Amino acid sequence: MEIEEHEALCAQIREQNKQYLAIFEAELNAANLKPKTIEKHLFNVDFYINDYLLRYLPLEMIGGCQNEIDGYLGGFFIRKVMWSTPASIKSNATSIKKFYKSMMEHGYVDKENYTDLCDDIKECMPEWLAEWESYNDFDDLADLA
């Protein structure tokens, strides 16, 4: 895919994602969540669907619940995101689950994909947290000095 094609496709997907995020934001507001909580959920989901999913092969939002979450929270997020912590991994997982539940309820994601996403998060979370600990084990660096 040529770079111009890639950029055009990403722009098209981002426009569609704006609509999904607006639906999600409306649901969060309707649930009477605090503005700071809503902002955090939106930030987490926006980063996932508008940065990570578009980074290599532009994937539409639906692609985010089809075997992408492990690569994101278990790899990319730990190694490439400077604000990655065990708490932020859990927070992102929660935001992403809430988002895809909303998308399922609005008919944009089928129940099987949503269930698979939730199962993947539940099963992989201990591995992701262990990976974060291993990757950020600065005691190993002290041994090298």
Image (cartoon, rainbow, N blue to C red):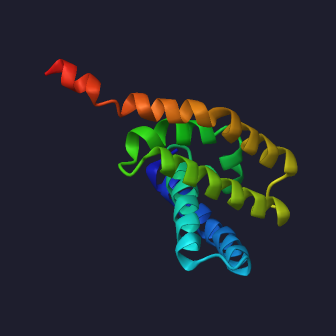
Position of the C terminus by quadrant: top left
Q: Is residue 21 left or right of residue 73?
A: right
Where residue 48 appears, as percent x and y from the top left, is 55, 54
Determine the image quadrant of residue 142. Answer: top left
Q: Residue at x 55, y 44 (%)?
A: 57
Q: Is residue 116 left or right of residue 123?
A: right
Where residue 132 appears, as percent x and y from the top left, is 45, 35
Where residue 100 appears, as percent x and y from the top left, is 73, 57
Determine the image quadrant of residue 94. Answer: bottom right
Q: Residue at x 49, y 55 (%)?
A: 51
Q: Is residue 144 left or right of residue 5?
A: left
Relative depth, front residue between 20 and 70: 70
Position above or below: 97 against 41: above
Relative depth, front residue between 112 and 138: 138
Position above or below: 72 against 28: above
Residue located farthest toward the top when viewing the structure as drawn = 144
Where residue 64 appears, as percent x and y from the top left, is 66, 48
Position above or below: 5 against 28: above
Number of labelled discs? 0
Q: Residue at x 50, y 30 (%)?
A: 130
Q: Residue at x 62, y 42 (%)?
A: 69
